[in-house]
Amino acid sequence: MHQIHESNTHFTGANGRKSLYDITVPKNWNGKLILFVHGYMGFKDWGCWHLAEQFFVDQSYGFVKYNVSHNGGTVDSPLDFPDMEAFSLNTYSKELDDFECILETLEVRLKDLRQEAAFFAIGHSRGGGIVALQSGHSGISKWVSWAGISSIEKRFPTGDALEKWRNETYRHVRNGRTKQDLAHHFDQYLDFEANQDRLNIEAYCNLNQKPCLIIHGREDTSVLLSEGEDLAKWTKTPLTIIENAQHTFNASHPWNKSEMPDTLAETCRQTLLFFES
């Protein structure tokens, strides 16, 4: 197997929108390909996800990280949120479609290379929810939630705030890092309302029959530890808690250091032990 290392390769995601993925496969590849799904207001090049990628590549795993098609990035400007209209129209259903699109893209590519792979999925935060919802996918052998959400419904406002959003069409959420007020179209809620069964993380976790690992930081204030406890309970899996770790396991963006924070490194080590078991 020749080594593969490519960045910003195109794939077609939800609604035919082009997006990007990175793929690295080492010469000593073990035949296992990790698919990494970023979270809300995230992107594949955020922080030190590249160092997490290198950790697994050094252990003979292939690694793919991709931008969901409506995360606000474009094929020409994949960082942050240059296409705020696309971001405003993103939905959880679109991200489920993106997952299937990138998996199909990789399956075709490996077939062309006359290679077979076992696909393992890691999802961070919102991406953890997407991976849980795709846990029944026939192409996935094992899956891991890093600080994953346990409920999509909890992500939406209720009561007067929901009615205000309905009446005004858009609601805005401040990105503390970029200082952008990012718009969310009310279609995001309508999509959830129309697809509640498909977007029920608890139901899919209760049905899960794949080996899975639930990891959460003890100090997470963005997705509370109780959500990790729910995921662990529903999947009948012990919860792995990373002490002194917040939502991104103490990584930040931009990340200019050559090493991951110890807490993210420990998250990677625990994930590796699970993949090797």
Image (spheres, grey):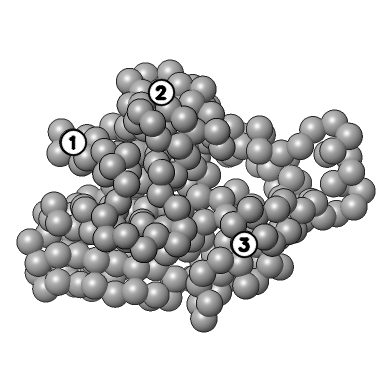
List the residue tagged with mark 2: 232
Q: Is residue 206 visible?
A: no
Front-lying residue, 143 or 52:
52
Locate the N terminus by quadrant.
bottom left
The residue carrying pointer 1 sits among few (fewer than 14), some (14 to 19) or many (20 or more) residues within 10 Å by Cα, namely: few
Q: CA distance from mark 3 to mark 1?
A: 36 Å
| Residue at screen point 12% across, 59% down | 29
Between disc 2 and disc 3, whose residue precedes? 3
List the residue tagged with mark 3: 178
In what element is the residue under mark 2? Answer: helix
> Which residue type carries mark 3?
Thr
Q: Nearer the viewer, mark 3 or mark 1?
A: 3
Evaluate if marks 1 and 2 touch, with contact meaning CB atoms under 8 Å apart.
no
- Up the image or down, 49 lies above or below 160; here it is below
Front-lying residue, 45 or 121:
45
Q: CA distance from mark 2 to mark 3?
A: 33 Å
